[in-house]
Amino acid sequence: MSGDTRPIGIFDSGVGGLSLLRELDVLMPYEDFIYVGDTARIPYGAKTEQQIISYSHEIMDFLRRRDCKMIIIACNTVTGMLTERDHLECEGAPVVGIINYGCITAALYVTYNFRIGIWGTQLTIDSGLYKRYMDNIDPTVRLFAQPCTDLVALIEQGAIGSPDTRDLTENYLRPMLREDIDTLVLACTHLPFIRGIIQDIVTAAVTLIDPARRTAVLCMKVLTDNRIARADRCELGRKQFYVTGDPDSFKETGRLLVGRMVDRVEKVDLSS
């Protein structure tokens, strides 16, 4: 029995979702993945809510046409907008978003002073999804949110070790550190790529929560519960990459971030 051999679809506005794909590949190296990066329309943080919803449906339609058995939203901004509007499925395929109770409970498990930072794009913060999830579990927790849109643009360019990236990171973190947070949720899939810089600035006094790891575990559970996991696990799965912008630029930055996992990258017109 080979089980369900159809691919898993995953999408983001750019390279950020590769941090989630990396975690998925650790847990499920035998599964096939199709990754879509909407690089021609990045940053999503500068778009309207209606534009982002429209873009997301175009991408999900593209993935369903390729018979994806599950779709993963590797973008906090999109998850924050779609979760309240759509059922967690797309034409029968389960949909999993990067914002979920797993990362919230992980933050609650490690905090001692119940002062937690949420670091993501302005639209992710404005969606209020992290706060709603947190309030459902423990309304006494204090949340301190900080947008990081400019930093996302630097990471998208692959400038993860530049002095500008470190300076901007420190400037963003300073207000939350003044609030005495002891836990920080990396509420943008680009941020794990500078995890070392972040941890160096906040020191061991602050625990970092990467939602990608919890989301990967959740995806494995959803596959199992829906009986669509691949049964044959003897061979490594294939990974296909599609972008709406420059494929060479995506490949160069992608290899810098996750290595040779990013191989052939194709340009796609989502409207066709």
Image (spheres, rainbow, N blue to C red):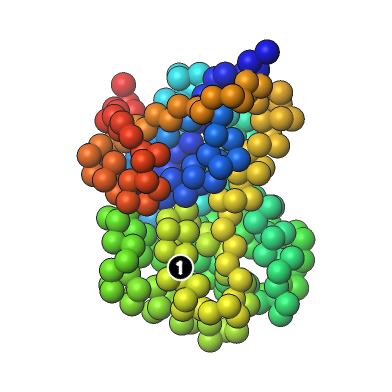
Kindly identify the residue that appears in the image at 47 percent across and 59 percent down: 192
Which residue of the protein is positioned furthest toward the front in this rendering?
A: 234
- Numbered marks: total: 1
In this figure, which residue is indicated by the disc labeled 1? 196
Location of residue 5 in the rendering, given as x and y in whole percent from the top left corner: 57, 18
Q: Quadrant of the N terminus?
A: top right
Tell me what residue is drawn at x 64 percent, y 50 percent. 214
Q: Where in the figure is residue 178, as x and y percent of width and height?
A: 53, 86
Within the image, what quadrant is residue 171 found in? bottom left
Which residue reaches farthest bottom?
178
Q: Nearer the viewer, residue 57 or 173?
A: 173
Which residue appears at 69% of the width and 52% of the height?
A: 101
Question: Is 230 situated left or right of 251 in this image?
Answer: right
Residue 216 position (above or below residue 201): above
Say which quadrant the C terminus sits in.
top left
Viewer-proximal residue, 267 or 271?
A: 267
Residue type, numbered disc 1: Gly
